Image (cartoon, helix red, strand yellow):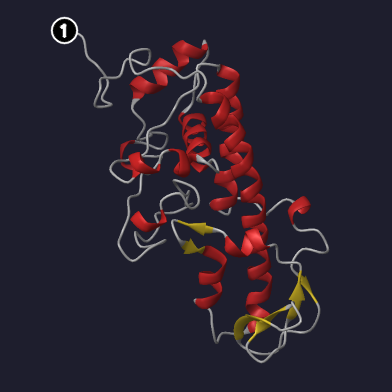
Amino acid sequence: MPFGTGNGPGVWCHGRLPDYHAFSGRGGYAFPLYDRGSGADASNLTPAILTALAEAYGEPVSPEELFDAILALLSATSYTVRFAEDIEDSFPHIPFPADPDLFKQAAAIGKEIRELEGFVREPAEAFKPRDFVRSRSEWTGPVGLHEGTDGEWYFCADDTGRFDGLPPRVWGFSVSGYRVLKRWVEARAGLEGPVYWPQFRDIAARIHELLHWFDQADLVLEAVLGDTLSRDELGLAPDGQAQTED
């Protein structure tokens, strides 16, 4: 969203094709990693970039590694702030590192982000300790999360489901101005609180861990921007298309 540039990651990974209005009411773009119509392992990534990176790094680069590296770099905490003016007018540009070790670091972080955002795995135990979103009472009413005067939270509209331990950064996390956890709860208002409490805690834990990986990606992005591969080095024309030889 134009008014939300600088808030949250530049991209989001879905396990299945999402609704184009997933984070706004104005539509969006989806770029599938795989092209299943062309074969089980066919990807939508330009073969030329895979070849160019393999030559630059001295070893093969798989479509999954490239996807994960892109996901990490565009998810870095500062990416949308650094390049706010550019991404208001065009698609994000990816700064590929000259150092193969930095590429591997980005790919490893991107894999963690992909598995969390795509619900491939559960959040790590380190990001949901006993005092994280800790229940203090039963959940008997319909969903209606609100904050009480005592500084604690209530998951249900009837003041049941009292809990604490919700980090402000998790509650305030947004993607281009879309408050993820807040909107998730609002979409379930009036439904059964006991049913949705475990899911609420899972979503909160995912955001908690994602924020960690976004910060780690930011450290890699900082290092990458100090030494990137140029378009010429990658054999790309100014418009981003692979060059051809006569």
Q: How far across and how far down the image is residue 89, in percent?
A: 28, 43
Which residue is the extreme one toward the bottom?
Answer: 158
Which SS class for mark 1?
loop
Whether residue 1 is visible here, answered yes or no, is: no
User: Residue 61 or 105: which is nearer the viewer?
Assistant: 105
Q: Give the residue displayed 53% in from the left and 79% down from the top.
A: 188
User: Residue 175 or 27: which is nearer the viewer?
Assistant: 175
User: Residue 194 or 161: which is nearer the viewer?
Assistant: 161
Q: Is residue 2 above or below residue 102?
A: below
The quadrant in which the C terminus is found is: top left
The quadrant in which the N terminus is found is: bottom left
Determine which quarter of the picture holds residue 208: bottom right
Q: Give the residue displayed 42% in from the left and 34% down from the top.
A: 41
Relative side of 9 to 167, left or right: left
Disc 1 residue crowd, few under 14, some 14–19, many 20+, Cα 10 Å:
few
User: Residue 35 or 106: which is nearer the viewer?
Assistant: 106
Which residue carries the number 1 mark? 246
Q: Give the residue displayed 44% in from the left and 27% down from the top.
A: 95
Q: How far across and how far down the image is residue 52, in percent?
A: 40, 16
Relative side of 74 to 49, left or right: right
Q: Is residue 144 above or below residue 70?
A: below
Question: Which amino acid type corresponds to the residue marked 1 in the rendered image?
Answer: Asp
Q: How far across and how far down the image is residue 143, in percent?
A: 60, 83
